[in-house]
Image: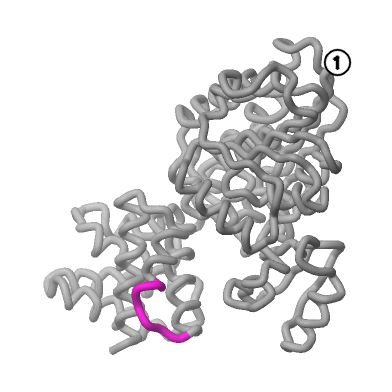
Amino acid sequence: MKELMIYQEAVSAITQVINQGGYINIVVDETLGRISVSESERRLFTKLVYGTVENKILIDYYLRDYTKQKRLKPYLKNTLRMAVYGLLYLNMADHFIVNTAVEIVKKKDYKGSRLINGVLRAFLKNPLPDLTKLNRLEYLSIKYSFPRFIVELLLKQYPEKAETILNTLSEESQKALRINTLKGTTAEVEARLQTDGISYLIDGNVLYTNQSMINHQLFEEGLVTYQDPSSQLVSEIVDPKPNESILDACSAPGGKTAHMAALADNQAKIVAVDVHEHKLKLMEENFERLGVENVELILSDARSLGSLFAPRTFDKALVDAPCSGLGVTGHKVDLKYQLSEEKIKGLIELQREILDSVAPLVKGELIYSTCTINQAENEHQMIDFLKRHPNARKIYEKVILPTNKQDGFYICKLMFNN
């Protein structure tokens, strides 16, 4: 009975994400905080929700011939989606998956349970459609469950690498943590991991482990914190020094701010700005855990900073801009469905406005970063910026395509001739 509850909760969570616009990480965390389940049940629930949402376009393509004449309620449709995900990807008996889907729908709609049973049995009986008969655009969109406009964008910008990128974003990536030098050393972290029998890999200050560290003492005490290597590289490119004044214009959730503080051994003077008050409060709590000091938190729209600070106030500024996030859709699996061409155009304009607001405040270097691989938000954004600001020049630029060990990112460092 309890196992059935896991599947019921998973369908409910999938419905919240797909039909009600919920953010998958928040929906999953809130559900797991509300129900009492074992660690294996937590993993199963998370896999069902993330897997179904991530593969929605492919699953819908496979289901289209069985459901196109039927107007299905969201709960029924998402039960089918979850069941097909299980049949395709989970090491479970087919009859168990079908019976479970039927039982959870029976609780809500007996007539619907018969439909579920019929569709799933027909799905199992017939061969899967041959995706290779589709044109390249449709093939890539359906196989990797990415909206067509995103696939078109990748094919245009990365014609030889588009499928590799999509494949990478569709695979589970290794989660990385940063070893926090404000609280301890790599040797200390390594010794405690060994004592606890946790398998790991350390590369510099980057820690890889398949074990969740959220409830581990190393995390709770602030010796480690989740942060992707690409994100860590941004702070290293900023290269904060003691006594430098540094503006972090779009600072939430605060990972780069905390890393910059650590790199400067809490001796830099960092101003961290964000437009969301609740995010600043979370940053404050996180900074306490990590031992971060000398950071001033300011609630403001980054486009209005000229009213708060005099020209050339800061030695350096980081604009880690709001972006389409195409480099992180591997673990933010719902993000690709929230994007549109219009939304990306709006983000490009927002980035431009933030850059133009921050530029006059900088004496030396401006570092621009995004977690997207869309050239319009990256290289082209910098080309346009340099046309508007001839007193700046580019001294560093890096495009990081996503791999199973790091997110896709863009980093550019500009120097002002003030």
Q: Residue at x 70, y 17 (%)?
A: 311
Place of residue 307 in the rendered image (x, y in percent of width and height, measured from the top left): 56, 19
Quadrant placement of the C terminus: top right
Q: Is residue 358 in the magenta section? A: no
- The amino acid type found where label 1 is placed reads Asn
* Residue at the spot of label 1: 417
Q: Quadrant of residue 247?
A: top right
Question: Tag 1, which secondary structure?
Answer: loop
Q: Residue at x 21, y 57 (%)?
A: 72
Place of residue 45 in the rendered image (x, y in percent of width and height, measured from the top left): 43, 74
Q: Is residue 79 left or right of residue 368?
A: left
Q: Residue at x 67, y 18 (%)?
A: 310
With respect to residue 115, does 294 lie above or below?
above
Q: Is residue 35 in the magenta section? A: yes
Place of residue 203 in the rendered image (x, y in percent of width and height, measured from the top left): 85, 65
Q: Quadrant of residue 201?
A: bottom right
Q: Which residues are magenta?
A: 32-38
Quadrant placement of the N terminus: bottom left
With respect to residue 42, does 337 lie above or below?
above
